Image (cartoon, rainbow, N blue to C red):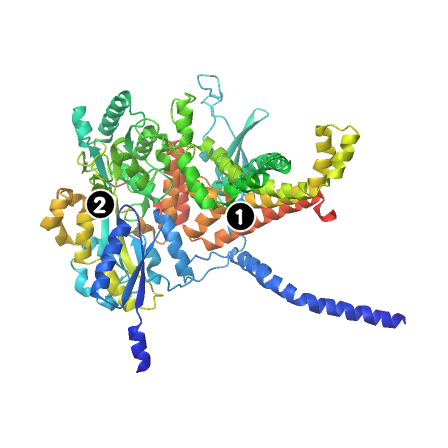
């Protein structure tokens, strides 16, 4: 009796490993405080993890290899559930049935491995084109709809602004460092130009085709012209710093950059930019890579029940609504896209709803458990073309051989 | 009598073994066991952080890592058998992918060389690792060379008598005392590809360049940048070790040579250099072995855009979860470092001291 009392009196600490890109950390900490107010006896500690997805994965894997109970709840990328399923509990065992229906079915499916719900959807992402409304007006230009138009528009604005004395002004910033972010960017160029999605859904390697060569040559042409040479070392936050500082006309980034850009204390361009769909080839449709993060509960947690409750609370209606309004992080709860307060704060959630539900997935399901290696081959090939070390054709031919050796899949034509 | 002393010798030997045993056991446990474990794992296809049962694959990982081929690259010929030349009269060669072997694994060209009018391809089945090795070797040789020269100069300066010598010696150590990851971040900022970075700001202020240089993104500037950061960081360490050697040299030697009329330069080459050789040798070995294992500055500043041996190993283990493969890389790094250590010991005669 005495024993149980003393255990009950002891606070339970739940550690949540979360991201710190933009306002992520602050949002997680606030939701955690809300939970702690409602549930005295539980202390939530938020562990701040690296910005680059693969660095974060590296950290997680070290916890898993040691079967460590140090972290209870992990924030995991949409591309990981297949790979990491063995380290997480089935959330259906902890009452997830009641809440799962309100989330987007596609993401729930993505997070379901062998009938087990590995992670609860937290926020979804899709690449967007950020553009400066004031500059388009100043130079009397339209929002570009094709990549060629983007090149021309960016060049005109860049030349004009540099002439006026801002030597650091650039046309277009995006994520070009050799990392997962380049895979998401390049996939958008490919898919919007009918060059396929690296590996097709039915398991054919489609990466080496004429359109892909053109696309890569086009992107390599941006480096040092409309984009700075440093773009091949940029991740999300580097691009955001330049755009938000008022030194770029266009930016490819995820929705989180919107709220920060509209904050006059943080940003030099508050009120002077907007977001829209990404450009496409003349004969293509815009494509936006599906991103997003989910919360999973560690198999090695000492308090899986409480941890699951925390995860479901953090990914619940209240918390997602707060994140949507204050940090423009896309909810995974359908209802929130019709919520008036959310739409007032972030009008583009309504306007670009189709973009978010039809985003292009990376080939992580079809290539599991080798997706990380597939992605590394892909971004290294693309990076070598961007930096001029390889020509596009050679890079793609070798990439095709590497993917063949890795996956054993046949070569196919991209499906348009 | 003879018997007695023999017994005594035996007893002493036995006692010596007994006394050595704890140290030997600890050495076995902490050094040989992990090394053996890594070697064993390198023969498997074990996946990092997974319950999957590993398979024994023999030397496959090593073959994948180290296989190299030299292949002749034939020129392109037209239908009549004439060699095709471009507008400048240069021979147009076949594309490497068409002549490189695909079996038992695919090969990719790392370098092309011209020898006696024929072009050869040096191809590897894992060009990324081969480049990681060359990157590391270039980095090591140049950075250790510069650190030794600069470290020697600094040590000679702070060894001479001047006011504020103590403070100078303390200040000198600051770069070395900063945690590498922190200093790497500082350098990342200074080397930024726009005028955010101090180097680009200065170069443009003095009109030395028209366009900003992307130091960390352009392949020609990546290694020089890494070397610069490392030289800045570890020269103080080198200087410190050399300084320790300098202080052991008795002043009388210089006095005597001055009486004999030796010049400062003569003094340096006949007294200073030979007498600091042992500490210089130790410093060189330390720095070389350290530089061969370089990880932090490559990981922070270049991540996956250019590898050192250790950072390549890290990404194989962490991103690709290829624990078997990364163990094999670890063994290769171990062997390379071991070879360097042996060469130093032989060349500098350290064991004879």
The residue furthest right is B1
Residue ID at (55%, 48%): B333
Q: Is residue B114 above or below residue A329?
A: above
Q: How many marks?
A: 2
**Who is closer to the viewer here, B117 or B16?**
B16
Q: Residue furthest left?
A: A340
Q: Is residue B287 left or right of residue B297?
A: right
Q: Quadrant of the N terminus of chain A?
A: bottom left
Q: Assign a secondary structure to mark 2.
A: loop
Closer to us: B49 or B169 = B169
Q: Chain of mark 1?
A: B
Q: Which mark is residue B63?
A: 1
- Quick check: B55 left or right of A315? right
Image depth: mark 1 or mark 2 in front: 2
Quick one: quadrant of the C terminus of chain A?
Answer: top left
Residue A126 horizontal/vertical position (percent): 23, 44
Please state the horizontal and vertical placement of residue A338, each as a whole percent of the image.
10, 50
The residue at which mark 2 appears reads as A359
Where is residue B219 shown, x and y percent of the image? 45, 33
Chain at numbered mark 2? A
- Local secondary structure at mark 1: helix
Residue A141 visible in the snapshot: no
Tell me the distance, in whole angstroms, between the alpha carbons under discs 1 and 2: 41 Å
Kindly give the residue lying farthest to the bottom in the view shown: A1
Q: Is residue A53 above or below residue B229?
A: below
User: Mark 1 near mark 2, Cβ–Cβ under 8 Å?
Assistant: no
What residue is shown at x 26% (from left), y 55% (from top)?
Answer: A29
Q: Nearer the viewer, residue A380 or B93?
A: A380
Q: Residue furthest front?
A: B163
Q: Would you call the spot at circle 2 few (<14 residues within 10 Å), some (14-19), or many (20 or more)?
A: some
């Amino acid at each position: 009796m005495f024993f149980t009392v003393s255990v009950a009196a002891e606070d339970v600490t739940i550690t949540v490993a979360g991201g710190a890109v933009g306002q992520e950390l602050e949002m997680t900490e606030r939701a955690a405080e809300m939970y702690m107010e409602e549930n005295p006896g539980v202390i939530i500690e938020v562990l701040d993890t690296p910005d680059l997805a693969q660095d974060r994965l590296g950290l997680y894997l070290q916890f898993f290899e040691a079967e460590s109970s140090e972290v209870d709840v992990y924030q995991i990328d949409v591309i990981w559930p297949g790979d990491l399923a063995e380290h997480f509990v089935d959330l259906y065992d902890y009452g997830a049935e009641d809440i799962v229906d309100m989330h987007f079915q596609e993401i729930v499916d993505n997070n379901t491995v062998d009938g087990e719900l590995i992670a609860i959807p937290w926020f979804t992402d899709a690449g967007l084109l950020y553009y400066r409304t004031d500059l388009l007006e100043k130079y009397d230009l339209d929002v570009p709809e094709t990549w060629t138009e983007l090149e021309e528009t960016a060049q005109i604005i860049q030349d004009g602004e540099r002439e006026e004395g801002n030597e650091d002004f650039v046309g277009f910033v995006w994520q070009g460092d050799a990392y997962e972010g380049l895979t998401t960017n390049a996939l958008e160029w490919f898919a919007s130009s009918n060059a396929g999605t690296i590996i097709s859904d039915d398991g054919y390697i489609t990466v080496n085709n004429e359109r892909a060569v053109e696309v890569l040559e086009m992107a390599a042409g941006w480096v040092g012209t409309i984009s700075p040479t440093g773009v091949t070392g940029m991740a999300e936050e580097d691009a955001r710093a330049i755009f938000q500082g008022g030194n770029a006309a266009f930016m490819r980034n995820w929705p989180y950059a919107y709220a920060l850009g509209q904050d006059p204390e943080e940003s030099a361009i508050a009120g002077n930019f907007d977001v829209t769909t990404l450009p496409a080839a003349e004969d293509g449709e815009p494509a936006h890579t599906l991103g997003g993060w989910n919360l999973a509960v560690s198999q090695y947690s000492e308090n899986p029940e409480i941890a699951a409750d925390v995860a479901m609370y953090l990914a619940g209606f209240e918390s997602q609504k707060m994140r949507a309004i204050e940090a423009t992080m896309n909810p995974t709860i359908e209802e929130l896209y019709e919520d008036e307060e959310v739409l007032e704060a972030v009008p583009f959630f309504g306007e670009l709803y189709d973009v978010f539900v039809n985003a292009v997935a990376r080939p992580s399901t079809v290539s599991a458990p080798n997706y990380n290696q597939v992605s590394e081959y892909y971004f290294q090939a693309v990076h070598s073309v961007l930096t001029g070390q390889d020509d596009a054709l050679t890079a793609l031919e070798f990439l095709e051989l590497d993917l063949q050796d890795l996956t054993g899949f046949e070569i196919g034509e991209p499906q348009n | 009598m003879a018997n007695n002393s023999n017994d005594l010798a035996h007893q002493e030997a036995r006692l010596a073994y007994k006394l050595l045993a704890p140290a030997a056991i600890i050495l076995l446990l902490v050094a040989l066991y992990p090394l053996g474990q890594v070697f064993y794992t390198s023969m498997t296809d074990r996946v990092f952080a997974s319950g999957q049962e590993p398979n024994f694959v023999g030397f496959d990982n090593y073959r994948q890592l180290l296989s190299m081929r030299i292949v002749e690259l034939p020129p392109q010929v037209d239908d009549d058998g004439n060699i095709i030349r471009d507008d400048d009269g240069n021979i147009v060669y076949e594309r490497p992918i068409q002549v490189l072997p695909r079996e038992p694994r695919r090969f990719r060209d790392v370098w092309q060389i011209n020898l006696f009018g024929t072009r050869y391809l040096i191809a590897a089945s894992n060009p990324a690792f081969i480049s990681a090795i060359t990157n590391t070797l270039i980095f090591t040789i140049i950075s250790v060379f510069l650190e030794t020269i600069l470290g020697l100069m600094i040590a000679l300066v702070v060894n001479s008598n001047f006011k504020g010598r103590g403070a100078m010696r303390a200040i000198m150590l600051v770069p070395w005392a900063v945690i590498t990851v922190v200093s790497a971040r500082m350098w990342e900022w200074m080397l930024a590809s726009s005028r955010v970075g101090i180097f680009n700001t200065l170069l443009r202020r003095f009109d030395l360049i028209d366009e900003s240089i992307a130091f960390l993104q352009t392949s020609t500037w990546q290694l020089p940048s890494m070397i610069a950061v490392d030289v800045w960081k570890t020269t103080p360490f080198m200087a410190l070790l050399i300084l320790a050697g300098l202080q052991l040299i008795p002043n009388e030697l210089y006095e005597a040579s001055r009486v004999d009329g030796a010049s400062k330069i003569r003094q340096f080459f006949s007294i200073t250099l030979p007498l600091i050789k042992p500490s210089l040798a130790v410093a060189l070995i330390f720095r070389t072995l350290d530089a061969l294992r370089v990880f932090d500055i490559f990981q922070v500043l270049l991540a996956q855009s250019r590898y050192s041996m250790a950072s390549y190993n890290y990404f194989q283990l962490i991103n690709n979860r290829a624990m078997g493969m990364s163990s094999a890389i670890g063994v290769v790094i171990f062997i390379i470092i071991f070879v360097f250590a042996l060469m130093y010991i032989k060349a500098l005669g350290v064991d004879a001291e």
